[in-house]
Amino acid sequence: MATQPNLATRYLGLKLRNPIIVGSCRLTDSPEGVKKCAEAGAGAVVLKSLFEEQIQAELNEAMTTSEAADTYGHAAEYISGYGAENAVGDYLRLVQGAKQAADIPVIASINCTTASGWTSFARRIESVGADALELNVFVNPSAPNRSIEDNEKVYLDVLAAVKAELKIPVALKVGSFFSSMSASLTRLGIRGADGLVLFNHFYQPDLDIEEFKVVAGPALTTREDMGLPLRTIAQLSGNMPCDLCASTGIEDGESVVKMLLVGASAVQIVSAFYRGGVELIGPMLADIGAWMSRHDFATIDRFRGKMRQESWPAGSAYDRVQFMKRTLEGRVSPS
Ligand SMILES: Cc1cc2nc3c(=O)[nH]c(=O)nc-3n(C[C@H](O)[C@H](O)[C@H](O)COP(=O)(O)O)c2cc1C
C-alpha cells in the first residue's frame, strides 16, 4: 500500500484520530496529564472518575450535621469530609482544563451505584464542555437479598435518569458480573446507551498467609486478562445497537488490532500505561499501522468486525469454554 493507513475511528459519535483511549485513572486526573496523553498521540481520554458520594455530599451541603446523621448514619462524617473538599467544583474545573489543554475528545466519568438524586448533576458536566460521559456503574452481585432483575434494574435506571438530563453521548462501563451477560448488555444498548465499555477491572482480594490478613491483589492487569472482553465483543458486536469499547489487558498494538477485529470501536488502556508511560502510544500506533499496511487495509472500517462471531466461519470457537479435543476417531476427550 503506497499511502499511510488511516487510523481514524468513531466512538460515541465522536471522531477519534485513532482508537487508543487512555482510560479513567490517575494519568487523566489533571489538565497536565491529559495534555501529556494528547501529545503522546491518544485518540481520546476518559477522566478520572468523580464518585456519586461526592456529588451527593455537595447536594446535601445545606444539611445540618444532625440532619445528615439522621440520613446517612455513620457515613455522615465521611460524606461531609467530601463536601469540604469541594470535589465537585474541582471536577468541573478538571473537565474545563482538560478541554483547554488538549484538542482530543474528553470523556468525563462518574462512578455510581444508584440512580438517586445525583443524576441531575450530570448536566453540569455537559455544560462545562465534556464531549461524552462514561458511567462506571457497579452493583454488588453478591448481595443475597437482591434478584437478577433488581440488579439489572439499577443499570437501566441509572442510564434512563442520566440520558434524560444530557444531550452528549453516554457510555456505560460495566463489570462482567451479569448472570445472563449478553441479554443484559443488549438490553442496555436497546435502552439507549451510546456505548458499552467492556469491562471494568475491579479490586481483587488476596490473602497474606503469614499474617492471616485479607490484602489487595494486583491492581494492574496483563494480556492474560483480555480474553473475556475479546470473547464478549466478538459475540455481541454484530447485533449491538451501540458502540463497544474494549478494556482490560490491552497492552500493545497487536491486542488493539484483535479488539478491532472482533468489532470494538475503540479501546481503553490503563495498566500498560502505568507500567510503561503513555509514551507507549506511539509504538502501538506504529504497530497497528504496519499491520494494516501488511494486510492492505487502508482504514479501520475495512477490517473492524471481520472476526466477530457471526462473520467468522468457525463462529463457535468463541462459545467454547471447555478444553476438549476431538480424537482421530471423532471422539471428544479432555485436552
Ligand atoms: C490505579 C487505577 C485507578 C483507576 N481509577 C479508575 C477510575 O477512577 N474510574 C474508572 O472508571 N476506572 C478506574 N480504573 C480502571 C481502569 O480505567 C480500567 O478499566 C482497568 O484498569 C482495566 O484496564 P487495563 O487492563 O488497561 O488496566 C482504575 C484502574 C487503576 C489501575
Image (spheres, rainbow, N blue to C red):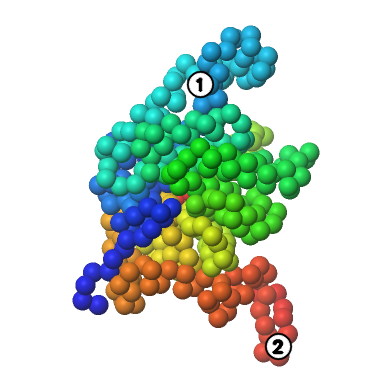
Residue at the location (65% across, 50% down)? 177
Q: Is 249 or 134 nearer to us in this picture?
A: 134
Above or below, comparing residue 165 to residue 328 in the picture:
above
Tell me the element at label 1: helix
Residue at the location (44% across, 26% down)? 88
CA neighbours of label 1 inside 10 A, class few (<14), some (14 to 19), many (20+): many
Q: In which quarter of the image is the C terminus?
A: bottom right
Q: Position of residue 95 (x, y in %)?
A: 36, 35
Q: Position of residue 115 (x, y in %)?
A: 61, 35
Amino acid type, residue under disc 1 in the picture: Glu
Q: Is 8 or 158 nearer to us in this picture?
A: 158
Q: Position of residue 319 (x, y in %)?
A: 63, 70
Q: Residue furthest bottom?
A: 329
Q: Position of residue 161 (x, y in %)?
A: 57, 38
Q: Is 156 or 138 nearer to us in this picture?
A: 156
Amino acid type, residue under disc 2 in the picture: Gly
Question: In this rendering, would 77 be left or right of 286?
Answer: right
Q: Which mark is residue 58?
A: 1
The residue carrying mark 2 is 330
Residue at the location (39% across, 26% down)? 90
**For residue 67, which quarter of the picture?**
top right
Question: In this rendering, would 217 be left or right of 50?
Answer: right
Above or below, comparing residue 41 to residue 6 in the picture:
above
